[in-house]
Image: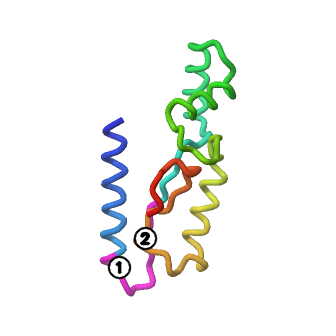
Amino acid sequence: MVHYGVSKAALQGVSRGLAKVLAGSGVTVNSILPGPTRTHGALAMMAAMAEERGVSVSEMEALFLEENRPSTLLKRFATPEEVANLCVYAASPQASATTGAALRVEGGIVESIA
């Protein structure tokens, strides 16, 4: 998924650059970085993989995380609502001092603390 990684890195670069351009204007710019999220597309992918492997979709989700995202602390896919909650916060006055940031909602998959 090189294309996906490159596009996400570019998005973070653009977001950080826009935050710098808009510094002091009161406008904040951040990147939201979701991890595995139980979207319609992810569910369809899990269903296809589950059928291939002869397991249930919920078993496939657990297998997928174990095999592909073993560092997850959440141990499940996030819901779209959980991702939306971070978006709502980032767009709210409560996040007025948060700008130029990469905000993760990925269940602890990323091993680094920075």
Q: Quadrant of the C terminus?
A: bottom left
Instruction: Say if mark 2 contacts mark 1, CB within 8 Å.
Output: yes
Q: Earlier in the sequence, mark 2 or mark 1?
A: 1
Instruction: Please name the predominant secondary structure of the magenta segment in the image.
Output: loop
- For numbered disc 1, what is the local secondary structure? loop
Identity of the residue drawn at 69% across and 21% down: 56
- In the image: residue 5, left or right of residue 88: left
Vertical arrangement, residue 74 with respect to residue 97, above or below: above
Q: Residue tagged by mark 1?
A: 22
| Residue 107 placement (x, y as % from top left) | 59, 50
- Which residues are drawn in magenta? 20-31
| Residue 32 placement (x, y as % from top left) | 49, 58
Q: Residue tagged by mark 2?
A: 29
The three-letter code of the residue at mark 2 reads: Val
Q: Quadrant of residue 1?
A: top left
- In the image: residue 65, left or right of residue 102: right
Q: Quadrant of residue 22?
A: bottom left
- In the image: residue 6, left or right of residue 69: left
